[in-house]
Amino acid sequence: MALKAGIVGLPNVGKSTLFNAITQAGAESANYPFCTIDPNVGVVEVPDQRLTKISEIVNPEKIIPTAFEFVDIAGLVKGASKGEGLGNKFLSHIREVDAIVHVVRCFQDENITHVSGGVKPLDDMDTINLELILADMETIDKRYDKSKKTMKSGDKKLAAEVACLEKIKQALDDNLPARSVELSEEEQFIIRDLHLLTMKPVLYVSNVSEDEVASKEHNELVEQVRQAAAEQNAQLVVVSAKVESEIAELEGEDKQLFLEELGLEESGLDRLIRAAYHLLGLYTYFTAGEKEVRAWTIKQGMKAPQAAGVIHTDFEKGFIRAEVCGYDHLIDAGSMSTVKERGLLRLEGKEYVVQDGDIMHFRFNV
């Protein structure tokens, strides 16, 4: 399931350093390898301890984690919506991703100039958010004018479209993102092909200095971003891009010792990857056998046949039943045979909604 999270930010906020840490980890890390499939796309494995625990019970020949993509999007300057700088490239790349990871600078460094002359994270957030809103305004205005002109008396379909566009238009005029507007399923379908930038879910990343990454001291800049993110019902992850680039060069015990020296249980990249994964509304289910234990990515709410189709389209077409047990049941039982003895292995049909952590085996007929 090829879903993408786009990393955005103003110049010199640490966006490229963070993305380079992601791709660098692919070259160096044995535990959580990444790989770069394009100059600006990195495929990241999703760290999941459940995969390890299942493998310890099943003892397979191979362990295959699930993954998704991070995209390093061209830097933005004020006026991007009007084509300034790399604006058109920036906006076109955002349209292609499913979620936005917005990196905000929350550190002072005289050697790294800021595009606006000073470190003001709220202003940085507003700059990018405003450019996305302005771009959406143009998109909405074009569709609105066209629909309004062609709408005839009694045309319920176009009338519903115009009403929907007016709701979004009002929010954008008030400097609010389109995702702040409550829309029915019908209205969501109406605007689906517009690919509005401000409809995409957002995860904020506060990039702090190396000294602050494990500090318990209060960082006022981070708190500003945290409050603003909360007001938008968005998540926040605090990382040090510089530290992450150093961690990415290490592996095994060296990596663990470095994390312990910093007082960290895990890297910021691991936290960022998981947060972005959940932001995209993704679940993981597992298949487990002697040959391999594997994690599979699905969208929340997906039913068993569609989940089977993630493995192969034939599995969905010929779906009969799914054998299912919960992750906790397997861990508690200690073996799949004990799960069966306890009657915890269920047979589920076509209407079963797959849950995060399900361990599944599909019966199908081609």
Image (cartoon, helix red, strand yellow):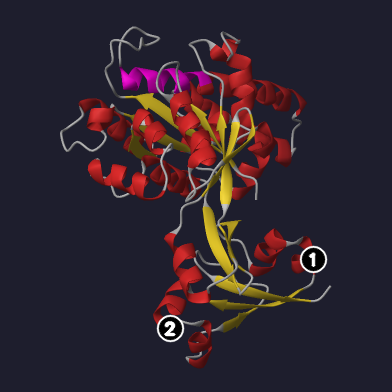
Picture residue at 30% right of the left edge, 24% below the top? 106
**Local crowd size for mark 1, using a 10 Å CA cut-off: few (<14), some (14–19), many (≥20):** some
Q: Which residue is mark 1?
A: 314
Is 107 drawn above or below residue 223 in the view shown? above
Q: Which residue is mark 2?
A: 333
Locate residue 298: give its quadrant: bottom right
Q: Position of residue 277 (x, y in %)?
A: 50, 48
**Local crowd size for mark 2, using a 10 Å CA cut-off: few (<14), some (14–19), many (≥20):** some
Viewer-nearest residue: 344 or 124: 344
- In the figure, is residue 290 to the left or right of 15? right
**Quarter of the C terminus within the rendering:** bottom right
Is 184 drawn above or below residue 197 in the view shown? below
**Of the residues shown, which amino acid type is indicated by label 2?**
Ala
Is 46 drawn above or below residue 311 in the view shown? above
Viewer-nearest residue: 160 or 292: 292
- In the figure, is residue 141 to the left or right of 284? right
**Of the residues shown, which amino acid type is indicated by label 1?**
Asp
Q: Position of residue 301 (x, y in %)?
A: 57, 60
Give the mark toward the camera: 2 or 1.
Answer: 2
Magenta region:
120-131
- Where disc 2 sits, the SS reads helix
Pointer 2 or 1: first along the chain: 1
Q: CA distance from mark 2 to mark 1?
A: 32 Å
Q: Position of residue 290 (x, y in %)?
A: 61, 74
Picture residue at 48% right of the left edge, 11% below the top? 78
Viewer-nearest residue: 162 or 178: 178
Q: Position of residue 240 (x, y in %)?
A: 33, 31
- Where disc 1 sits, the SS reads helix
Q: Is residue 128 magenta?
A: yes
Is 247 drawn above or below residue 16 in the view shown? below
